[in-house]
Image (cartoon, coloured by chain):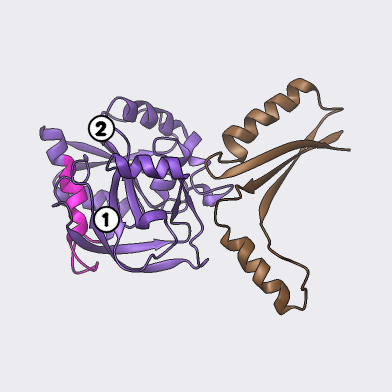
Chain colours: A brown, B purple
Amino acid sequence: MAIIVVDVMLKPEILDPQGNAVGSALPRLGFTFAKSVRQGKRFEIEVEGEPTAAQLAEVEKAAEVLLSNPVIENYVVRVEK
Amino acid sequence: MRVGVITFPGTLDDRDAARAVNVGGAEAVALWHADADLKSVDAVILPGGFSYGDYLRCGAISRFAPVMKLVIEAAGNGMPVLGICNGFQVLCESHLLPGALTRNSDLHFLCRDQEIEITNNTTAWTSSFAKGEKIVIPLKNGEGSFQCDDQTLAKLEGEGRVIARYVGENPNGSRNLIAGITNERGNVVGLMPHPEHAIDPLTGPSAQGLGFFTSILNAMVK
């Protein structure tokens, strides 16, 4: 069994009010390390056995069509060991 | 003339939209998201609400509802389609309209009477208005910030495809105060505020929203 992970993030030029809210909450709690925060989504897709190249290509397609909106978001597909 | 009003699971404003259609002088026809038939309607309205719970992204799942396949095909053939609020989000996710609607810039759900200016009165849904006419209708959404890349924005502006703009302070961070846009052909319109809640002064801030529902009659007469 393996997990295929799809990370979806708003494109850098798209305003991220949620990330900004988190970014401004951190210093209020005494965490001063963050210059900025962006918030995204992570999908964990379980598959039987080792993912094949064909499966990964299908996941790429699903990420393009459903999991992300290419107008405002970028995605990365990877396999979690 | 028959105007279909689609109900998805989680749609809220289908009854108001149907009433607005009837008051405007057309016949509202109820369509269900799982329908594989548009019931011979002449136009379609995608009303507001939280279809499929807004899961994943607003409108992202509705786009793949069986009825949407027919709507996308009919829109391509010139059928007038109006998406209000969540319906606008569905139209963007369906790529019938460019851009996307994202979280309001201040993160708050907004519910208020909003002044907008009609900036294009040549579409199937705005011909009852004068160009530059200002109307007050309700705005109520959490993800109403219209976003697109610079190239798309320049194209929308250059082709006069912004059909309505917010007047005064930007309520949600939309680029260029955009409240509504249309496609190249002018048959598909997306609008964030809610004209269907402003067809009777008894229950809305005005009756000025009715123009969207009478415009469609003009479009059909042509």
Q: Position of residue B87 (x, y in %)?
A: 39, 46
Three-letter amino acid code at disc 2? Val
Residue B92 visible (yes or no): yes
B207 part of magenta stretch = yes
Please determine if labels 2 and 1 lie on a single subunit: yes
User: Which quarter of the figure has residue B114?
Assistant: bottom left
Contact? badges 2 and 1 (CB < 8 Å): no
Q: Chain of mark 1?
A: B
Q: Residue at x 33, y 50 (%)?
A: B180
Q: Say whether residue B104 is left or right of residue B120.
A: right
> Which residue is situated farthest in the left direction here?
B221
Taking the view exactly as shown, the residue that stands out farthest to the right is A81
Mark number displayed over residue B196: 1
Q: Residue B60: within the magenta?
A: no
| Residue A41, x across and y down, in percent | 67, 49
Say the numbered circle drawn on residue B41: 2
Residue bounds of the magenta highlight = B198-216
Q: Earlier in the sequence, mark 2 or mark 1?
A: 2
Q: Secondary structure at mark 2?
A: loop
Q: Secondary structure at mark 1?
A: helix
* Residue B210, position as x, y percentages in the image: 18, 54
Locate the N terminus of chain B and report the quarter of the image it occupies. Answer: top left
Q: Where residue B204 sits: x, y (%)?
A: 24, 67
Q: Amino acid at mark 1?
A: Glu
Q: Give whichever of A2, A33 is nearer the camera.
A: A33
Along the viewing direction, whichever of B64 and B97 lies nearer the viewer: B97
